[in-house]
Amino acid sequence: MWLHEKFYDAEKLLKYNPNWILYTISNRYAYFTLLPKPITEYNVKNAPFLWLAQFTDALKLARMPIKDFCTFACHSLGPMKGKVIVFTNCPRSGSTLITQMVQVGQQVQTIAEPSPFTNLAMIYDEHIWSSDFFNTVLRSLFYTYCKDMTKDQIYIIKLDCLSTPLVGHMHKLFPEIPHIFQFRENVENATISSYKMMDAAISWKETVYLQSNFPKLGKWLFGYEIEKSTVEKVKPESLLERAFIIFAAPYICFLKNRHCYALPKVTYENLISKPEETIGAVFDVCGISKSLIPEALTALNRDSQAGTVLSRDKMAQVKSLELSKLDRKRLNEIAKRMELPESIFHF
């Protein structure tokens, strides 16, 4: 049901009001939410998942045809003024933690997991738009999220794992943007943690069932299919196998686009065992003063996802999983089908 109030002038609504924030996109529309505070208040420490804060805090919703949105964004909101850095990751690899560690001082602004990038990656995977229009939308997303930047600002956009396929396209459009990739070397623990994350979300089981057996109904209810091309290639038979695909697929993109990244992968293990050295290298890429490292290290003392469904307390309530011999065999077979390096992805 669509409740229409009235038409607004996009220039007044979006260009000069930092409380109107892009919420999501579809192949037809761009959606914006009016929030009680400006986007600067929704940094990663206050909103580990921006899309969730927008859903819970939204006061109003606005909709714009996607082509009109692109025209407006490219002509009225760009170009970007400050320094932009993009973080991508494999899930359950400490990406929220590292983003909270770089949210230091007065110069840095972070936003975490804006959903339009996720939807754009899935739309690209389904070949819905031409390459030219896809690139126009991608450019428009950056201009929209960075519209309130100042020249001396450092703007860090932390994307979710599903957005990693966009990195190569971002690099072609914005070669000046550095990229950082987060990974967890303990693949078994990360896969089990990804399974628990998906198992905690009850709708995952329904999503998998409907998208597999009734794809049109599944898409109408749950949106674009996650990792569609990989799922079609590998054909997972369980939630565990699908969780592994979602964990591992970003690593394939990282290997393919290594030339786009400013650092070798930043691992969760190094972040925990030698945090000062690891975050120091990230600070160098971002242009953040190393005098702020002590402030960054305080993030290690708190739950980076506190207050969300993925908090330590919530995840502790989800039953863990012991991999059987059959599970290990199947996961090794899937890793081989995905052409993942056996030295890293082996169970």
Image (tube, grey):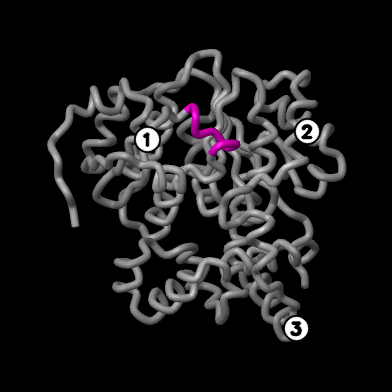
At which x and y percent is residue 222? 37, 65
At which x and y percent is residue 194? 63, 64
Q: Which amino acid type corresponds to the residue marked 2 in the rendered image? A: Leu
Looking at the image, is mark 3 or mark 1 nearer the viewer? 1
Q: Which residue is mark 3?
A: 324
At which x and y percent is residue 297? 78, 33
Judged left or right of residue 145, residue 253 is right
| 204 in magenta | no
Judged left or right of residue 85, residue 213 is left
Residue occupying image coordinates x 60% and y 40%: 87
Looking at the image, is mark 3 or mark 2 nearer the viewer? 2
Q: Secondary structure at mark 2?
A: helix
Which quarter of the figure is the C terminus placed in?
A: bottom right
Residue occupying image coordinates x 23% and y 23%: 12
Q: Which residue is mark 2?
A: 297
Tell me which segment is drawn in magenta. 40-46
Q: Which residue is mark 1?
A: 35
Structural crowding at the residue carrying mark 3, measured as other residues with C-alpha within 10 Å and reported as few (<14), some (14–19) or many (≥20): few
Mark 3 and mark 2: Cα distance apart in space: 38 Å
Structural crowding at the residue carrying mark 2, measured as other residues with C-alpha within 10 Å and reported as few (<14), some (14–19) or many (≥20): some
